[in-house]
């Protein structure tokens, strides 16, 4: 196949996550026996699916305005991070979605996808409207409602996982700020 016709890593990643919401919803509906939980899943499913697809479309659109260098950086990041495999990894985890461990695993994969999307949005030097970060966080709330269902144990586990995730993001931001500060100091010393 001609390399011009091969999809980019970004296109492959976006394609690999395209069915994530529908796969999660379908499998949850298959394993859930509680009718109230099924109603909640069905109530949130269209929103979850639409948000995920909208975010993917937005990322694709923003990449069309990016510089060649930032696209090359994004391609390298996606290759090194094995981002495109996350969609397939989710399919491996989905049969276990009926258990707390399975739900936490699926939630973890979705969080990794969100992180990758966040990193891509940082790599592509485009001024992002504030709603993009809010939408990414809103996905967590919707997923939590879909996965949480009737189990207080599951809701507690998801809440703790979310707190850990937010703490991790905070520490990552602090590390990036410290590294930036050190780089600026080094450049000042060299001047």
Image (cartoon, grey):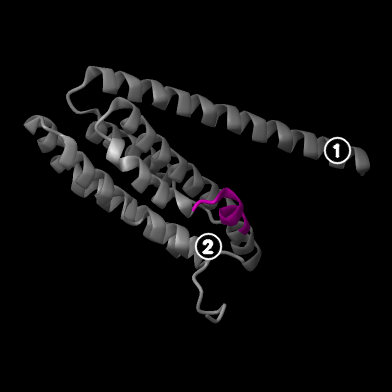
Can you give x and y, in whole percent of width and height, for residue 180 in the image? 72, 38
For disc 1, the marked residue is: 186
Relative placement, left or right, of 101 versus 174 is left
Would you call the spot at circle 2 few (<14 residues within 10 Å), some (14-19), or many (20 or more)? many
Point out the frontmost of discs 2 and 1.
2
- For marks 2 and 1, the one nearer the N-term is 2
Can you give x and y, in whole percent of width and height, for residue 70 in the image? 62, 60
Can you give x and y, in whole percent of width and height, for residue 186 in the image? 85, 38
Q: Please tell me whether residue 160 is drawn above or below residue 22 in the rendered image.
A: above
Can you give x and y, in whole percent of width and height, for residue 82 in the image? 54, 51
Let me know if residue 77 is in the magenta part.
Answer: yes
Q: Residue at x 46, y 62 (%)?
A: 12
Q: Residue at x 55, y 81 (%)?
A: 2
**Res. 110 image quadrant:** top left
In front of the other: 186 or 17: 17
Let me know if residue 85 is in the magenta part.
Answer: no
For disc 2, the marked residue is: 9
Q: Please tell me whether residue 8 is drawn above or below residue 97 in the rendered image.
A: below
**Res. 45 image quadrant:** top left
User: Magenta span: helix, strand or loop, mainly?
Assistant: helix
Q: Residue at x 61, y 66 (%)?
A: 67
Q: Which residues are magenta?
A: 76-83
Helix, strand or loop at mark 2: helix
**Res. 138 image quadrant:** top left
Contact between labelled residues 1 and 2, with CB atoms less than 8 Å apart: no
Q: Is residue 62 visible?
A: no
Would you call the spot at circle 1 few (<14 residues within 10 Å), some (14-19), or many (20 or more)? few
Which label belongs to residue 118? none
Helix, strand or loop at mark 1: helix
Cα–Cα gap, marks 2 and 1: 34 Å
Relative placement, left or right, of 154 versus 171 is left
Q: Residue at x 10, y 37 (%)?
A: 39
């Amino acid at each position: 196949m001609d390399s011009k016709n091969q999809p980019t890593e970004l296109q492959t990643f976006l394609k690999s996550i395209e069915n994530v919401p529908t796969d999660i919803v379908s499998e949850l509906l298959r394993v859930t026996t509680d009718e109230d939980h099924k109603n909640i899943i069905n109530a949130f499913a269209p929103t979850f699916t639409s948000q995920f697809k909208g975010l993917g479309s937005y990322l694709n659109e923003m990449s069309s305005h990016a510089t060649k260098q930032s696209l090359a950086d994004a391609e390298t990041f996606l290759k090194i991070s094995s981002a495109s495999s996350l969609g397939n990894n989710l399919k491996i985890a989905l049969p276990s979605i009926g258990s707390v461990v399975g739900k936490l695993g699926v939630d973890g994969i979705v969080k990794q996808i969100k992180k990758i999307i966040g990193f891509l949005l940082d790599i592509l030097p485009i001024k992002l409207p504030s709603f993009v970060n809010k939408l990414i966080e809103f996905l967590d709330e919707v997923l939590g409602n879909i996965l949480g269902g009737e189990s207080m144990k599951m809701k507690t586990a998801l809440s703790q996982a979310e707190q850990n995730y937010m703490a991790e993001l905070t520490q990552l931001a602090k590390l990036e700020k410290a590294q930036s500060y050190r780089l600026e100091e080094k450049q000042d010393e060299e001047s």
